[in-house]
Amino acid sequence: MLIPKKVKHRKWQKGRSLKRTAETRGTELSFGSYGLQALEPVWITSNQIESARRTLSNFMKREGRIWIRIFPDKPITKKPPEVTMGAGKGAVDHYVCPVKPGRIIFEMDGVSENIAKEAFRLAGHKLPTKTKMIKK
């Protein structure tokens, strides 16, 4: 799974809502011929990214090339169940990547369009957002 090696601050604040904003960076294909684009604002966890990546590589029979365009660097804290209020912020539980609509999540090259389309369809089922395939 993807996690940062080192972070400046161990625990972050939640931040502003992702609603009603579109992505300005990472909206165009940079590496491959095909891409999987997010259509909704969402937090994608490192588990979900890894699951989608494995689905892509397995369907492609490890041909071609895959690029992951997002990285989960936002720590999410969680307190244990049945713990009373107070006593500070919980420990870091997992990491997420905040994704806005329009962000390219994966890119792919070296396979036919049919294989890319089906691979992205299967990988999209592993992600908590609606997605679409784009091509150059």
Image (cartoon, rainbow, N blue to C red):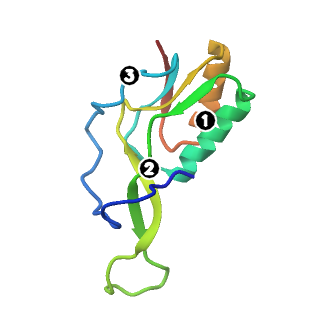
User: Residue 34: where, in percent of width, then height?
Assistant: 53, 19
- Would residue 90 appear left or right of 19 to someone viewing this image? right
Q: State the residue in front, 112 or 41.
A: 112
* Residue type marked 3: Glu
**The quarter of the displayed image where residue 25 is located:** top left
Provide the residue designation for mark 2.
72
Provide the residue designation for mark 3.
28
* Residue type marked 1: Ala
- Would residue 55 appear left or right of 37 to someone viewing this image? right
User: Residue 50: where, in percent of width, then height?
Assistant: 59, 46
Element type where label 1 sits in the image: helix
Q: Earlier in the sequence, mark 3 or mark 1?
A: 3
Q: State the residue in front, 8 or 94.
A: 8
Q: Residues within 10 Å of mark 2 (few under 14, many from 20)?
A: many
**Residue at 61% in and 35% down:** 123
**The quarter of the displayed image where residue 42 is located:** top left
**As drawn, 96 above or below 101:** below
Mark 2 vs mark 3, CA separation in Å: 20 Å
Provide the residue designation for mark 1.
123
**Residue at 52% in and 51% down:** 2
